[in-house]
Amino acid sequence: MKKYLILIIATLLCFPVFSQTFQTGTITVTFNDASRTGGFGSGGGPGRQIQTEIYYPATSSGSNVAVATGSFPVVVIGHGFVMDWNSYDNIYSELSKRGYIVALPRTEGGLNPSHSDFGLDLALVGNKVMLLNTTNTLAPIFVGKVIQKLGLAGHSMGGGSSFLAAKNNPSVTCLFNFAAAQTNPTSSQAAKQVTVPTLIIGGQADCVAPANTNQNKMWDSTASTKKFQITIKNLTHCDFGNGTNFNCLFGQNTSNCPNAINNLTALKLYMNFVNPFLDFNLKGICSEGPRFMDSLNLSQVIFSKQQLGNLVCAPTNLKDGDYAKNIIVYPNPIEDLLFVDGINETDFQVQIYSLLGKPITVVSNYNDGKLKIDLAELPKGIYILKLSTNNTSSTKRIVKD
């Protein structure tokens, strides 16, 4: 029996956190902006105080517990008008369990919020959380744990403010929001300077911030070449979040748009789009791009949609083709083991690439015309198998489930 070194990829496009489910840890951190005043909280230093609730993948559930093994991208979520961070416990719980560090600023929660300040707070918190990756005194549990990828998000007022935060912001990787409401200064004006991949989600039955006067205008203005607007059937303004906030429900009910769907169902409907969007943009998982596009194009829950661009991986010079005659490759999709049967050990080469064409090395076993490749540690995704001889080569796409 011989052992062969087979070239396989481990690129930045495939992080192991994809297939894991974590416990949720929580910590309260107060950041400060010395150039402004006001805010909420204390102890962050001079200037404006920005108390922030952070939920993260952890080794066990609880407050100030250890961060799970690995490193994780950041999502910052802005709350709606006269709402608080706990109105979104269903969203931040799901995202933290899926491998995201989720930060929720508590500023501008009163009756006269400053949208401009809130947008600046969202942007600042995103940068500050990413900086926790290096030695710090605010939250040392995050040292070495934070991927420098940032998704800005928000609901209602926070959704509109997410455009203010993403405007000309080089730290932002992607933007998404729920039932985004126009702000002052206007979100749609700020959107003209937002160029990152953007996902705008609204509800068909939203009478508080209806799409035609809010999200549609933001979509029209957004400068991104990859932007998507989805209006989901029957969802109301307060279906985004846990659906229990009194202030949100009061405003919604007085607008004569009562809930028609239970909250758990609503969460599944919109997170079906959010999860692959984030996994593609923040974790770089290639296979989540097609998953998002399939949901966008095939889902029966969409009332209306608009699309510019696609979520696809960078092109590769490898092309599909029939693999070599008399060679059998199985199974596909694979779970742990891939077999290449019918090969001649004297004149063949086998390589596996990412969709970016980048390889790494693993050890596989060859015996009696069959090569066994152990892919148990390979993250889920789409790969390219290349079979080569002295005279010819052929490629085939394989899927790791």
Image (cartoon, rainbow, N blue to C red):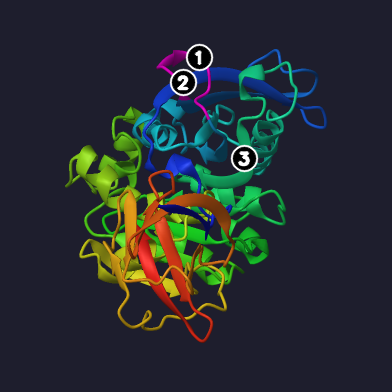
Residue depth check, mark 3 versus mark 2: number of the one nearer the observer: 3
Residue 191's spot in the image, x, y percent?
61, 62
> Would you call the spot at circle 3 few (<14 residues within 10 Å), some (14-19), or many (20 or more)?
some
> What element does badge 3 sit on?
strand
**Magenta stretch bounds:** 58-69
**Residue at the far bottom in the pictured view:** 391
Mark identifier at residue 25: 2
Q: Taking 180 as reference, is 304 left or right?
A: left
Q: Amino acid at mark 2?
A: Gly
Q: Amino acid at mark 1?
A: Val
Q: Between residues 209 and 74, which one lies in front from this camera angle?
A: 74
The residue beneath circle 1 is 65
Q: Amino acid at mark 3?
A: Ile
Q: Between residues 333 and 232, which one lies in front from this camera angle?
A: 333
The alpha-carbon separation of the residues under discs 3 and 2 comes to: 17 Å
The residue beneath circle 3 is 147
Q: Residue at x 68, y 28 (%)?
A: 132
> What element does badge 1 sit on?
loop
Residue 228's spot in the image, x, y percent?
45, 66
> Relative to 211, is 386 above or below?
below
> Relative to 100, is 328 above or below?
below
> Relative to 117, is 308 above or below?
below
Q: Residue at x 56, y 70 (%)?
A: 314
| Tag 1 and tag 2, C-beta contact below 8 Å | yes
Residue 1's spot in the image, x, y percent?
40, 52
Please tell me how many numbered marks the rendered image carries.
3
